[in-house]
Amino acid sequence: MKKVSKITTFVIVLIIAVLTANVAVYAYENNDDVYLNDTADFLTADEEEQLFDFMVTTAEATGWKIGVVSTAEDYSDNGVIRAAENYFDSYFGSSADGVLLLMDSANGNYVLHIVAANGARKYISNSDAIRIFEHIKPSFEAYDEFRTAATFLDDAINYRNGKKLPRQVNIEIAFFFLIAAIAAAAITAGVVWHRYHKHAKISATAYLNKGSINIYNRSDRFVREYTTRTRNSSDSSGGGGHHGGGSHGGGGGRGSR
Amino acid sequence: MTKCPNCGAELRFSPEKQKMLCDYCASEFTTEELAEADKPITEAAAAPAKSEEQEDREKREFAEATRVYVCNNCGASIISDENTAAAECYYCHNPVTLSGRVSGEFRPARLIPFKLTRPEAEDVFKKFIKKKWFVPASFRSEKQLEKIVGLYTPFWLTDCKTNATVSADAKIIHTHTSGDYTVTNTKVFDCDRAAYMNFEKIPADGSKKLNDDFIDAVEPFDYKELTEFNMNYLAGFMADKYDVPKTDILERIKSRVLGAATEVLKDDIKGFTTVSITHQSVNLIRTDWEYVMLPLWFMTYIYKGKIYEFAVNGQTGKIAGLPPMSGGKFAAALAIIFFVILLIGGFVSGFLGG
Ligand SMILES: [Zn+2]
Ligand SMILES: [Zn+2]
C-alpha cells in the first residue's frame, strides 16, 4: 500500500508541474465532447485550463458530452432552465447524452442549473440532480466557481459509475415529523377515548321557554381604563454584494425524446 | 305558613341568611323569589283535574293488572302487565322472581307509546356498532340483540322557574398604530345580569340504576305524543319502577339549567370585545312535576365483568351508549398513525428513500 500511495503522489506532482510549465503556452479548445464557456469570467486562465482537462477526462470516463457554462444574465426561474438546455442543445445537439452545468451571477443573485440529458438521465434522475446541486452549492456560495465545477465533474463520474451521493438528512424536519407523529397519535387517542367513555352532553336550552325570560337587573359598571404601547419590530434585511442574497435555482433533468 | 314551591314542605325563616329555607329539599328563597314563584309556570291551563274517586279507581286497576318482578342479583324492579311474564332481568340478565303487585302510585298519568319496533331498534343498534371501529369483534355478534328489551322508563318531567345571575368581566379594546408603536386602549367593565326564566318539561329518569348522562343522551322526546296512560300500552313491554323520588333530582335539574341560563345572560352582555364570566348561579324558585313513562329500547352487555348499557329512544330512534373499546385495536390504530407520519417524515427529511 505504501508503494502505491508514493506513486500516486509522484504522478500528481508531475501533472501539476507539467500544467504550471505550460500555462501560457496552451489555450484549451472546445471539441465535440467538451464545452467550456466562461462568459461571466469567473475563472482565471489557469483554472480554465485545468478545468478543461478535467472535463476531457470526465467525458472519457463517462462517455457523455460535458458542458460547463458561466453567465451573468439574471435569469428567471424558467429562464435558467431554458438557457441551460439551449446551451446543451445548440452545442451538443438535442439527442446527445451528457450533462451541463450553468453558473449564473447577476444583481447579487446566483443560479446553478444542471442539465442531465437523454442517456445520462438513466444515471442522474431529477432528485439526483437536486442532490448534486446541494452538494456543489456550498462551493458556489463561497465564490469558488472552479471548485463548484470540479465537484460537479467528480459527481458526474461517480453517478455514471453508480456511486450516488449520500443522502442529506434534515434533522430539523425529521424532528418536526417525530413531534407531529406523537401529537397526532395523542390527539387521536384523546378523541377516540372520549368517544368511548363520555356521553354526548345535551344542553337544557331546548327546554327553555324563551318568552319567559325576564331580565330584571342589567348593569354595566365602568371600572378602569388603561393604554399600552408596544414598539413594532422593524424588519431590516441586509443586501448582498456579488453572490450575496438568497439561493436561487436548482437541479433539473430532461427526459429523452 | 308558606309551603316550599319546589317540594311542598313547610318553609322556615333563617335570620342569618335573611331567606326562607326548606329543610326538606334544601331550597332557599328571597321574598322576591317567593312572590315570583306564585305565578304559574305554564300559561296553558292544566288538564281538567280528575275526581279523587276516579284517580283512586285508576290506581286500583293499575295495581290489579300489573305484576312486579324483582331481580335478586341487582335489585331491579320490573313492572309488567299480568299477561306478560318477565323471565330475565333487563339489566343484569339474571332470572327474576315474581314479588307481587305494585302500588297504584306507580301508575303514570301519561306516557309516550313505543313508535319504533324491535327490528327497527335492532337496526339502529347494528348501524351504530358498525360505525364503531374499536369494539371487540365478539361484541358485534347477533346474540347480544336477543337481550334487547322494550322498557317504559319512569321519568320526572320538570317545569321550573329559575332565578339566574351572572357577573362578568367585560372589555372594550381599541388598537391603532402610531408611528412605530401599536397603541392598545382597554376599558374594563363589571357587568351583572339577573333574570327569571322558565324551563319546561326537562326530563330526568327516575331510575337509580340508569346512568343519568347516558339517559340524557337519548333526548329529545316529542312531548306532543304524550297520551293518557292505558294498561294496553304495557302489553309485550316491561316498565321500570321508579326509585328516585322527585326531590332527589333537584340538584340534577339545577346543574342542567345553570349552563343554559348562563348562556342566555352572557348573550345579553353586548357591545364588548371580550366577556368572561366570573360568577354564575341559578336558584330554582318553583318546580312542578309530572311523572310519565317514556319508551326506551334497552340493552346491557357484560364484557369483562363490566356492564355496558345502550338505549334507543323508542320514539325517535336516537341511540346512546358507550361500547367497550378493544385495547388491541386502539393501540394498533395509534401505532399506524404514528408510523405513517414518521415514514412520511423519513422521506421528507431524507432519512429514507433513494
Ligand atoms: Zn322544599
Ligand atoms: Zn338484575
Image (tube, coloured by chain):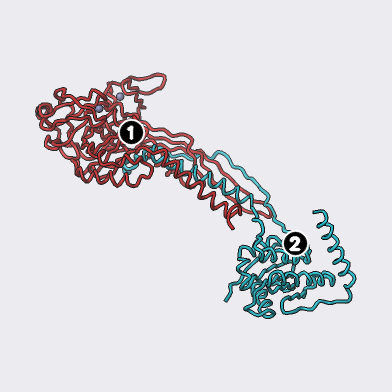
Using the rendered image of the protein, determine whether residue B96 is visible from the camera's viewpoint: yes
Rendered view: B89 above or below B339: above
Distance between mark 1 and mark 2 Cα atoms: 67 Å
Residue B283: x and y in percent read: 37, 31
Q: Nearer the viewer, mark 1 or mark 2?
A: 1
Residue B299: x and y in percent read: 26, 36
Circle on res. A29: none
Circle on res. B303: 1
Rendered view: B96 above or below B330: above
Is there CB contact under 8 Å for labels 1 and 2? no
Subunit of mark 2? A
Task: Report crowding for label 2: few under 14, some 14 to 19, many 20 or more residues within 10 A (C-alpha).
Answer: some
Residue B274: x and y in percent read: 51, 44
Residue A114 appears left or right of B198:
right
Quarter of the C terminus of chain B within the rendering? bottom right
The amino acid on which the numbered mark 1 sits, given as a three-letter code, is: Tyr
Picture quarter containing residue B330? top left
Of B321 and B10, nearer the camera is: B321
Colour chosen for chain A: cyan
Q: Which residue is label 2 attached to?
A: A141
Of B263 and A196, nearer the camera is: A196
Subunit of mark 1? B
